[in-house]
Image: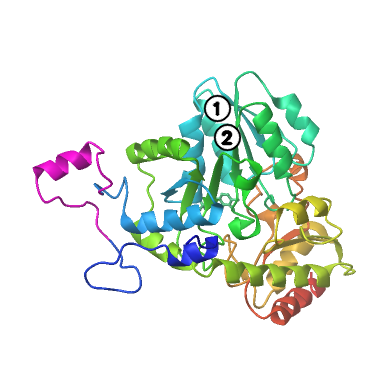
Amino acid sequence: MSHHPITKVIRTQVPRTDEMEHSSPLFLTSSFCYDDAEEMRATFADENDNNIYTRFSNPNVQEFTDRMVALEGTEAGFATASGMSAIFASFMTFLKSGDHLISCRAIFGSTHTVITKYLAKYGIEYTYVEASEVESWEAAVKPNTKMFFLETPTNPALEVIDLEAAGKFTRKHKILLNVDNCFATPIAQRPIDYGADIIVHSATKWLDGQGRVLGGVVLGRKELIHEVYLFCRSTGPSMSPFNAWVLSRSLETLEVRMERHASNALKLAKALEGHEKISSVRYPFLHSHPQHGIATRQMTNGGGIVCFELKGGLEAGRNFLDALQMLTLTANLGDTRSIASHPASTTHAKLTHEEREKVGITPGLIRISVGLENISDILNDILQAIDKS
Ligand SMILES: *Cc1c(COP(=O)(O)O)cnc(C)c1O
């Protein structure tokens, strides 16, 4: 009997041990044993699926990976210690010196550092393109282009990139489409349905959803993920079994959490639209969003992030953060607790003013990661802080 992906996520589990436990046990072990020399030889020769060493595989990590595979609808996956190690592994596995990468300009800050500072060191060139200008992607293609990397919705400006167009573009040029699906989560959008070859995640955000552990995962076709596995088993960015155990439990509630995050976010976005101290509100499922049509076509909800622009600019942004009473000031996002951040003075402070403008980070931009508290409490705290901004 074939189950719905959500059912599979909840029911996919480490095989029950002789203790007959109901919930998955934690396999905190760095290595695994063999009954005899022959079994050990066969395991090392890859003739069976036995575990060897937790840098290569571990039952808890496999459980988390299998659950992510069910969610994203891919053939295989490899879990990593963080989102950044997943992204780095996806680059290092498929790109080599002399290759060219096309990436959307609006990407996570550390991904930007990897592309511009570290890939360059290995002779891997890149071109940034504008997410919403599909025509500009064509002009970036070179004979040595190997991969197109994007995030949608983007952080923090919440631009939505047309995944169908991205799939068509990469198939036409026979290059790999690599999508960071962290912001939308597979509950809202499945890049595989549009032809993505590789999907990467920071499990640290919505997948955990409670701000406890770091994690990441690379997903895709079997033959591609096997290459990622070979790279990671030798270089060592493996996920801790403890983190995998925590994250597996989190995935069981991902769908219900994301539905509430998204409905709270939509209510917040609608309530803030038209406020006299705000010049704009951005949320993919608001009719005023420039890519509202694309968003509603490829996403089943608008996600849990809402951004708005305070008319008072940088100073108002700082005042707003200081006036908050309940929302937390912290670098994370995708938590049960609502979080506020001011990218221009924090996460994106190292960029020049021009670089910030190019990715939509204006001085008064506030990013809210909408939590699971009652929406009226979230709204009241934000409204009173806007009054004092
Ligand atoms: C946080 C984040 C990452 C990096 O993940 P870590 O788990 O912090 O390494 C990558 N991409 C996006 C979109 C993120 O929000």
Residue 136 lies in the magenta-colored region: no
The reply to whether the C-beta atoms of the residues labelled 2 and 1 are less than 8 Å apart is yes
In the image, taking residue 234 as reference, residue 290 lies left or right, namely: right
Toward the left, the furthest residue is 36
What coloring was used for the rendering? rainbow
Across and down, in percent, residue 364 comes to: 78, 58
Which element carries disc 2, helix, strand or loop?
A: helix
Q: Nearer the viewer, residue 243 or 51?
A: 51
Q: Residue at horizontal 77%, vertical 60%?
A: 283
Three-letter code for the amino acid on which mark 1 is drawn: Ala
Residue 39 lies in the magenta-colored region: yes
Q: Quick check: 378 above or below 163?
A: below
Residue under numbered circle 2: 115
- Classified by dominant secondary structure, the portion drawn in magenta counts as loop
Image label count: 2
Three-letter code for the amino acid on which mark 2 is drawn: Ile
In which quadrant of the rendered view does residue 284 lie?
bottom right
Q: Nearer the viewer, residue 115 or 5?
A: 5
Across and down, in percent, residue 50 comes to: 25, 48
Task: Indicate the quadrant containing the C terminus: top left, top right, bottom left or bottom right.
Answer: bottom right
Question: Which residue range is magenta in the image?
Answer: 28-50
* Residue 157 seen in the current view: no
Residue under numbered circle 1: 120
Q: Quick check: 65 above or below 233?
A: below
Q: Residue at horizontal 78%, vertical 75%?
A: 383
